[in-house]
Amino acid sequence: MPEEVFYLLCTGELPDEKALTTLQEDLKSRSEVPSYVWDTIKSLPEGTHPMVILSIAILSMQRQSVFCRKYSEGMRKGDHWETTLEDALQIIAKIPSIVAGIYRMRVVYKKRILSDPYRDWGGDFAHMLGLEDPDEEFPNLLRLYMVLHSDHEGGNVSANVGRIVNSALSDPYYSLTAALNGLAGPLHGLANQECLKYVQSIEEKFNGVPSEDELKEYVWATLNSGRVIPGYGHAVLRTTDPRFTALLNFGKRVCPYDNAFRIVEMLFKVVPGILKEHGKAKNPWPNVDAASGSLLYHFGMTRFDFYTVMFGASRILGISAQMIMNRGLFLPIFRPKSVTFDWLKQEISKPSGSKK
């Protein structure tokens, strides 16, 4: 479950039953969202992007920051991690209600669904989103989705931005908002949307699921036009993303006959070989984005501009854990060195292969 993974990221160990129950009860005790947050969400202009609404909602709660208050009172450096944890728990506890509320109030224009205190963090999140789910599988997808997207080393934009802002001792409300704003950029947070759009373009082209030969021809046409295959390749991984495999296995169990999911499966079968033959991809294997969007769509979440919000909700877990760890390690403020134009000219003028 997502809360178990948060515990793991903070401590290096999975919680036992007692520790998990304690964490879940703690999150429940903090989960009530202040009324002014709902007023803020309602007051934003029509057409405001859901990511903007999420950022503003989190930032509106900054006045409750324990880190900020304790720091102004002269908090010891050794206590920074504890007050960072306190703020992070407050945010994590409220995120399911806030995200689900944004979806209900500002995306599908329906009434908010209140939290169910007897559900776990992910199950309650799914409950409050209110999607049609006769087989009760959406909570399982949401738990899996949140776990798989929760943490992804420190070099991606959202994690890096969150750590940089937090290194200035900005509290988690400021830092997580900054991280989400980085995630909103199309090169970071829109990947699963682009993958789903590509899958839907295939379904539209062939009025359903194509044959393997038709799909190969379509993929080659994409590459020959100078475009890439969304969801394939990764900046770090050089093999099939295990997160993709987990989502693929979920889809095989839950929606094996869904057209979009069938196309995702077929792409996995044909694209790596084509990319190897094409010869330009360092990594021809799928990443997590190749499957995540199609599964959200299957359960009725059809507004693409909300997918980044779901991504952001999961990233809050991992980025929070990184901030807690960084404050516990007393890491200094990020301060990269600068270079001059003369240095740039010298580097550019060096023969290829000699640049360092």
Image (spheres, helix red, strand yellow):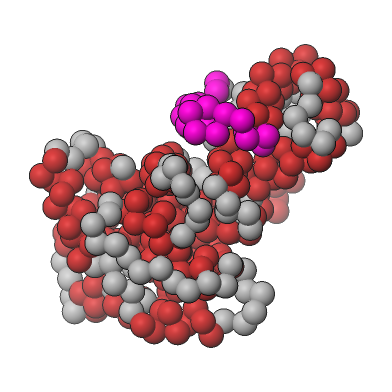
Front residue of 305/329: it is 305
Q: Position of residue 287 (x, y in %)?
A: 57, 32
Front residue of 346/44: it is 44
Residue 75 picture quarter: bottom left
Front residue of 288/83: it is 288
Q: Which residues are magenta?
A: 239-261
Q: Position of residue 169 (x, y in %)?
A: 34, 65
Q: Which secondary structure dominates the residues rendered in magenta?
A: helix
Give the answer, above or below, for where 39 lies relative to 348: below
Instruction: Please indicate, yes or no, whether residue 80 appears anywhere in the rendered image.
Output: no
Residue at the extreme left of the image, as rendered: 18
Q: Residue at x 48, y 74 (%)?
A: 111
Q: Residue at x 69, y 30 (%)?
A: 263
Q: Position of residue 356 (x, y in %)?
A: 61, 33
- Does 93 lie within the magenta span? no
Locate residue 209 relative to residue 6 in the image: left or right.
Answer: right
Locate residue 284 relative to residue 60 in the image: left or right.
Answer: right
Quadrant occupied by the N terminus: top left
- Does 257 lie within the magenta span? yes
Locate residue 170 relative to residue 118 in the image: left or right.
Answer: right
Q: Residue at x 56, y 41 (%)?
A: 295
Instruction: Please indicate, yes or no, whether residue 132 appears anywhere in the rendered image.
Output: yes
Residue at the extreme front of the image, as rendered: 134
Give the answer, above or below, for where 252 lies relative to 134: above
Residue 239 picture quarter: top right
Q: Residue at x 10, y 44 (%)?
A: 18
Give the answer, above or below, for where 206 lies relative to 273: below
